[in-house]
Image (spheres, rainbow, N blue to C red):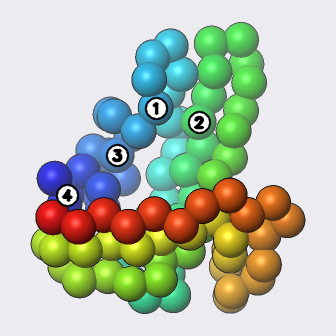
């Protein structure tokens, strides 16, 4: 499960439901690291997701948010903080 959240090629396989798909995933999985996930819809829609990792305990816990991007720049429309505990 950890690898599915932290390895771009695996994340692309499950992150959004068909007919949508992930065309790009860049993950810097470390506290303060950022993520960029680009989802694509069946009619040419795009949904970029930029976020930051707040806490990383390898194999055990990920805490991430879309409230910040690169260099802790505040996001225009923050939506969530996610906590994944394995």
Residue situated in front as seen by the camera: 31 or 10: 31
* Left or right, 54 with reference to 79: left
* Left or right, 40 with reference to 16: right
Residue beneath disc 3:
11
Give the CA distance from mark 4 to mark 2: 19 Å
Residue 85 in the image: above or below residue 48: below
Residue beneath disc 4:
3
Going 73% across and 19% down the picture, which residue do you hit? 44
Going 53% across and 45% down the picture, which residue do you hit? 24
Q: Earlier in the sequence, mark 4 or mark 3?
A: 4
Q: Earlier in the sequence, mark 4 or mark 2?
A: 4
Q: Is residue 23 visible?
A: yes
* Left or right, 36 with reference to 63: right
Give yes or no for contact between labels 1 and 3 (Cβ–Cβ under 8 Å).
no
Residue beneath disc 2:
39
Give the CA distance from mark 1 to mark 3: 9 Å
Q: Position of residue 48 (x, y in %)?
A: 68, 47
Q: Residues within 10 Å of mark 1 (few under 14, many from 20)?
A: some
Going 16% across and 53% down the picture, which residue do you hit? 1
Q: Earlier in the sequence, mark 2 or mark 3?
A: 3
Residue beneath disc 1:
16
Q: Is residue 50 visible?
A: no
């Amino acid at each position: 499960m950890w690898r599915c959240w932290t390895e771009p090629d695996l994340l692309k396989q499950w992150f959004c439901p068909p007919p949508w798909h992930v065309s790009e995933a860049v993950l810097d999985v470390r506290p303060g690291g950022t993520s960029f996930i680009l989802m694509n819809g069946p009619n040419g829609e795009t949904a970029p997701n930029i976020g930051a990792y707040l806490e990383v305990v390898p194999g055990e816990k990920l805490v991430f948010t879309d409230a910040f991007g690169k260099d802790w720049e505040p996001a225009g429309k923050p939506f969530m903080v996610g906590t994944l505990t394995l």
